[in-house]
Image: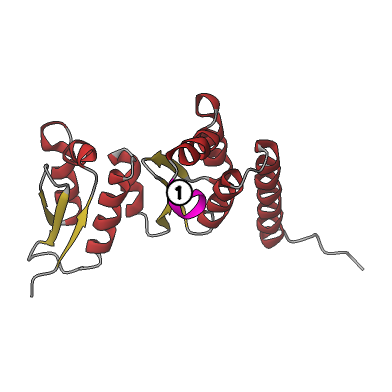
Amino acid sequence: MEQKTYIRIPGERVGALIGPGGKTKKRIEATFQVDLTIDSETGNVDIRVKPDQSDVSVLFIVRNVVRAIGRGFSPKNALQLMNEDFDLIIMDLEEYVGRSKNAQNRVKGRIIGKEGKSRTMIEELTECLVSVYGGTVAIIGPYDMLPVSKEAVKMLINGSFHKTVWNHLYAYRRKMKKEKGELWYEPARRRE
């Protein structure tokens, strides 16, 4: 039985998926043992597992990689989804601020920040990658940090001051470092 799936990406992102001279498409096909059929006019992408590939779970991974490229990530960043501890979250801004393009542009500006500083802070403090593209915000990162990154983005969407968001993220990092430290730290035993 042939294993396949289908996804549609924005037409202007097809070039990023194919890559110069088809390099990105070939790399994905070789890495995951799949065949990609890409319709450059519609953005439709068919993903089929090659007959000699026994692990059909690659369909899920490749679908996420293609979705990530479609949501504005570079192929290099999208391929981080090969790591089994990483996942992808896509937030539709329409769900948070409605269909108004002005409202969406305002919150996209808050998330990106002046010269990209806001997005960079979220990425550094959560160890996640953030892409603001079209009407979406996409996040790639470790499972344990994705909710933290998503919460920071939601705080910015809801109008929180940037400093409030950074303080929230710094506090979370301190808490995580403390928990990890306590987990691995064994106090010296007292001599009696």
- Say if residue 100 shows up in the picture: yes
Which residue is rendered at x = 69% and y = 58% of the image?
Answer: 179
Residue bounds of the magenta highlight? 94-99
From the viewer's side, name the closer residue of 41 and 163: 41
Q: Is residue 140 left or right of residue 178?
A: left
Residue 37 x/y as whole percent: 9, 51
Query: According to the image, label 1 marks what residue?
Result: 93
Q: Residue furthest right?
A: 192
Residue type at mark 1?
Answer: Leu
143 is higher (above) or lower (below) than 129: below
**Element under label 1?**
loop
Nearest to the observer: residue 179 or residue 118: 118
From this viewpoint, which residue is outermost toward the front?
Answer: 100
**Residue 175: percent from left, percent from top:** 70, 54
* Horizontal relation, residue 165 to residue 191: left or right: left
The C terminus lies in which quarter of the figure? bottom right
Q: Position of residue 134 (x, y in %)?
A: 36, 41
Q: Is residue 95 magenta?
A: yes
